[in-house]
Image (spheres, rainbow, N blue to C red):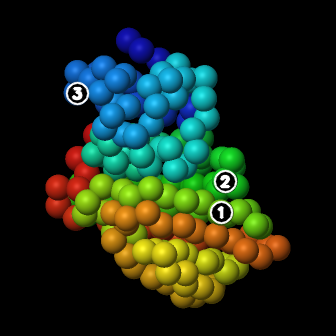
Amino acid sequence: MASEPHTIAEHIAGTVRQLRKERGWSLDRAAGETGVSKAMLGQIERGESSPTVSTLWKIASGFRVSFSTLFDSNKPALGELHRDGWESVWGDDSAGMQARLLFPYDPLLGFEMFMIELAPGALSESSAHASGVVEHIVVIEGEMELRIDERWQTLRAGEGLRFFADRPHTMRNNTATRLRFHDVIHYLPGAASGT
């Protein structure tokens, strides 16, 4: 019996490898579907690379699974308290973004929820997610500049925006203080299969 992964990086490595094998895909095919290079996918599968949040999104979109599939396999039942563990945080990537999983994807409800922190001066560019993915952003602390379809908008604490995420979008913290926001990711029917 295989042992459970001890770090989130090990969990991501094992999950990407499992997703590829379940589909019978070569690394070449997976690279074509995800837009992530064959070399990078191999490094991720071997646990030799710490992919950015943007790269993880490309992988999730290419495999047509929810983003949280890469983070956590524990799905609390309705009414059950979900506690943070090692599996819930993907720490400061090169873009200065940290994602904390609050609620993993639930196929019955069709959504997952994250608390995202963006460091002062940080910018995170996201490629288009799969068709049918809707993001709901609510700023908790700080100020976010959000670009969708080449149009910048400013969101302050207590403000939110919902948008189809099947297009490139950019989140920027152009201040000297941290930015924290909730990101509820809703998958319309057929947008993600989960695992």
Task: Tell me the CA gap for discs 1 and 2.
Answer: 6 Å
Q: What residue did someone put label 2 on? A: 95
**Would you identify the image quadrant in which residue 22 lies?**
top left
Task: Tell me the CA gap for discs 1 and 3.
Answer: 34 Å
Residue with the most extreme left position = 190
Q: Secondary structure at mark 1?
A: strand
Task: Tell me the CA gap for discs 2 and 3.
Answer: 31 Å
Residue with the most extreme front position = 150
Q: Residue at x 63, y 77 (%)?
A: 144
Q: Residue at x 25, y 51 (%)?
A: 192
**Would you identify the image quadrant in which residue 26 lies?**
top left
Q: Residues within 10 Å of mark 1 (few under 14, many from 20)?
A: many
User: Which numbered disc covers residue 68?
Assistant: none
Amino acid beneath label 1:
Leu
Q: Residues within 10 Å of mark 3 (few under 14, many from 20)?
A: few
In the rendered structure, which disc, 1 or 2, sits on the residue that comes first in sequence? 2
Amino acid beneath label 2:
Ala
Q: Image check: 103 left or right of 186?
A: right
Q: Nearer the viewer, residue 79 or 6?
A: 6
Q: Is residue 184 above or below residue 15?
A: below
Q: Residue at x 17, y 61 (%)?
A: 189
Q: What residue did someone put label 3 on? A: 23
- Residue 13: horizontal and vertical position, in percent? 48, 27
Q: What residue did someone put label 1 on? A: 123
Q: Residues within 10 Å of mark 2 (few under 14, many from 20)?
A: some
- Residue 36: horizontal and vertical position, in percent? 45, 36
Residue with the most extreme top position = 1
